[in-house]
């Protein structure tokens, strides 16, 4: 993972403003993955101009970008169960979105939680079909949250985060998600935490820096 200089960040942010201004975001996921937290942050928060590193971010600039200035239209699925009625609601949000963020518990998948994997697989069957049916695919992000519950992630140095993300991508269920999302060029994978404001800023920063890539 590269760390860009401040001047490059400023240029990139201009691209992000063009890519995101007025766009409709759908935030999907099961209960307890952090949807409500992320929705509130995206509609009220801001992010620093740059970070020195991804895992334990240190603000490298006092300049901040107000997310509300982008006029992003955020639509979040309610924390409902995975029955057919819930998926119908998800589909409506998906079909209206320019960018789809699918949140999952990365820490539980890494730990081999069969229940969480089964739920993700159920979600995949539906979301994959919706993506295939769209004439113009939305940008699709797999957002792994709660990485702060994984001791290995917490102890990572900046030069090892790329290896950690690569191992997560190689999990069979994550590979399937990326494949159904259009492949690595179309479906992006972002890992992080929503534990604190700084953690949330770091996660959102990662997402936005990949929006135009």
Image: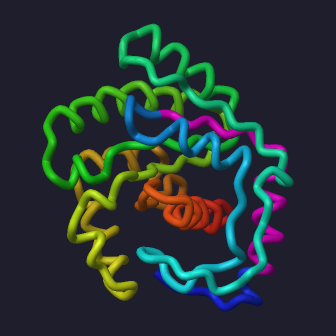
Q: Quadrant of the C terminus?
A: bottom right
Q: Reply above or below: 104 against 14.
A: above
Q: Please name the residue shown 37% across and 45% down the image.
A: 177
Residue 103 location (% of width, % of height)? 44, 43
Magenta span of residues:
10-28
Q: Please name the residue shown 66% across and 33% down the image.
A: 135
Q: Quadrant of residue 204?
A: bottom right
Residue 101 location (% of width, % of height)? 54, 44
Tell which of 209 and 64 is nearer to you.
Answer: 64
Residue 17 location (% of width, % of height)? 82, 61
Tell which of 203 and 114 is nearer to you.
Answer: 203
Asked if residue 17 is among those painted magenta in the image, a careful observer would answer yes
Q: Reply above or below: 189 against 5.
A: above
Q: Reply above or below: 205 against 62.
A: above
Q: Quadrant of residue 205?
A: bottom right
Residue 97 location (% of width, % of height)? 68, 34
Q: Please name the residue shown 54% across and 42% down the image.
A: 37
Give the side of residue 30 with respect to residue 108, left or right: right
Image colouring = rainbow
Asked if residue 166 is among those painted magenta in the image, a careful observer would answer no
Count how many numbered circles sit on residues in the image.
0
């Amino acid at each position: 993972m590269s760390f860009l200089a401040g001047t490059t960040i400023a240029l990139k942010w201009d691209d992000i403003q063009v890519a995101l201004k007025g766009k409709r975001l759908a935030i999907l996921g099961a209960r307890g993955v952090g949807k409500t937290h992320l929705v509130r942050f995206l509609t009220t928060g801001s992010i620093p101009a740059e970070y020195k590193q991804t895992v334990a971010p240190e603000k490298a600039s006092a300049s901040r970008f107000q997310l509300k200035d982008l006029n992003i239209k955020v639509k979040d699925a309610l924390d409902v169960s995975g029955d057919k009625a819930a998926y119908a609601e998800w589909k409506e949000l998906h079909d209206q979105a320019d960018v789809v963020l699918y949140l999952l518990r990365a820490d539980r998948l890494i730990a081999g939680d069969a229940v969480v994997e089964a739920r993700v697989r159920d979600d995949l069957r539906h979301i994959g079909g919706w993506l295939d049916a769209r004439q113009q695919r939305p940008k699709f992000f797999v957002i792994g949250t709660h990485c702060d519950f994984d001791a290995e992630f917490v102890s990572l140095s900046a030069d090892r985060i790329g290896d950690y993300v690569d191992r997560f991508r190689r999990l069979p269920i994550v590979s399937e998600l990326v494949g159904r999302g259009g492949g690595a060029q179309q479906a992006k994978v972002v890992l992080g935490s929503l534990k604190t404001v700084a953690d949330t800023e770091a996660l959102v920063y990662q997402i936005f820096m990949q929006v135009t890539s």
